[in-house]
């Protein structure tokens, strides 16, 4: 059964979670402005992740911004939150108005092209408020995004467009993995921002 949000977004998951596709919420001009602003003002760093017991330096770049210097530990990497920029606060406020949720942090990823992606994972770290909303905003190149159920392996895919908003909450992280598959066809960059609610 589909679940509708107040904004009219439909739950993409058939069971065990809530993923609301709010669609494109920013026009092309606004999206491009945000893309170039974040490309230049964010303190981008190559990410360090722990894979099979080894530290790997990723090609993609990442950044972590949060209230009160909140820390985030994932894939064996610890990040201390940088102070929100005015542009991040503006975007956060616009996203909060749509989702009717509140966020105190934001993880940003910069994918230079389709050769960079993200493998199967869940955002289920213990420092995230359980079942809370995670709002994912995309700027730049369109990319495929896929969910896979942890038990029956059912999968659901969608395109994340420039200026779009996808919201994950409820049991989603407990029962589903998600990934950003690599694609040689994609030659342009994408910036993804995931606004989160961390335990304080």
Image (tube, rainbow, N blue to C red):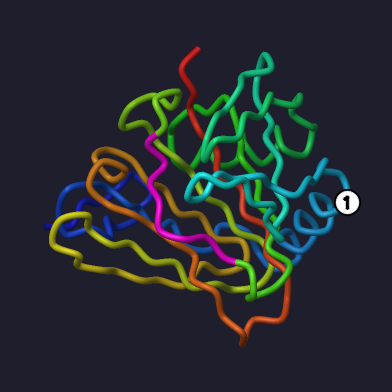
Q: What segment carries the magenta color?
A: 117-124
Q: Is residue 16 visible?
A: yes
Which residue is at 65% across, 25% downward? 66
Q: Which quadrant would residue 110 be assigned to in this image? A: bottom right
Residue 118 part of the magenta segment: yes
Spot occupied by residue 89 in the image (x, y as percentages of width and height): 70, 32
> Residue lying farthest right?
40
**Which residue is denoted by mark 1 in the rendering?**
40
Which residue is at 64% across, 81% downward? 186
Which residue is at 55% across, 29% downward? 73
Q: Is residue 96 visible?
A: no
Spot occupied by residue 101 in the image (x, y as percentages of width and height): 44, 31
**Along the line of sight, the residue nearer the viewer: 52 or 142:** 52
- As drawn, is 14 to the left or to the right of 55? left
> Residue lying farthest front?
53
Q: How many marks?
A: 1
- How many C-alpha atoms fall within 10 Å of the one at disc 1: few (<14), some, or many (≥20)? few
Quadrant in the picture for the N terminus: bottom left
**Along the line of sight, the residue nearer the viewer: 106 or 73:** 73
> Residue lying farthest bottom?
185
Q: Which quadrant would residue 145 be assigned to in this image? A: bottom left
- As drawn, is 139 to the left or to the right of 3? right
Which residue is at 47% across, 61% downward? 119
Spot occupied by residue 172 in the image (x, y as percentages of width and height): 28, 45
**Along the line of sight, the residue nearer the viewer: 58 or 143:** 58
Residue 146 part of the magenta segment: no
Please tell me whether mark 1 sits on a helix, a strand or a loop: helix
């Amino acid at each position: 059964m589909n679940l509708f949000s107040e904004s009219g977004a439909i739950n993409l998951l058939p069971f065990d979670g809530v993923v609301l596709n709010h669609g494109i919420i920013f026009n092309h001009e606004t999206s491009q402005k945000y893309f170039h602003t974040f490309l230049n003002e964010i303190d981008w760093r190559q990410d360090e992740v722990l894979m099979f017991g080894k530290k790997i330096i990723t090609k993609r770049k990442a950044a972590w911004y949060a209230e009160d210097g909140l820390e985030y530990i994932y894939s064996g990497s610890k990040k201390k939150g940088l102070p929100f920029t005015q542009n991040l606060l503006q975007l956060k406020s616009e996203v909060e108005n749509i989702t009717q949720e509140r966020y105190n942090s934001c993880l940003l990823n910069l994918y230079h092209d389709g050769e960079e992606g993200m493998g199967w994972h869940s955002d289920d770290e213990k420092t995230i408020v359980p079942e809370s909303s995670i709002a994912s905003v995309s700027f730049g190149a369109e990319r495929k995004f896929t969910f896979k159920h942890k038990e029956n392996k059912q999968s659901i895919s969608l395109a994340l467009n420039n200026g779009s908003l996808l919201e994950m909450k409820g049991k989603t992280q407990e029962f589903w993995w998600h990934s950003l598959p690599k694609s040689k066809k994609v030659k342009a960059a994408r910036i993804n921002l995931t606004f989160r609610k961390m335990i304080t």
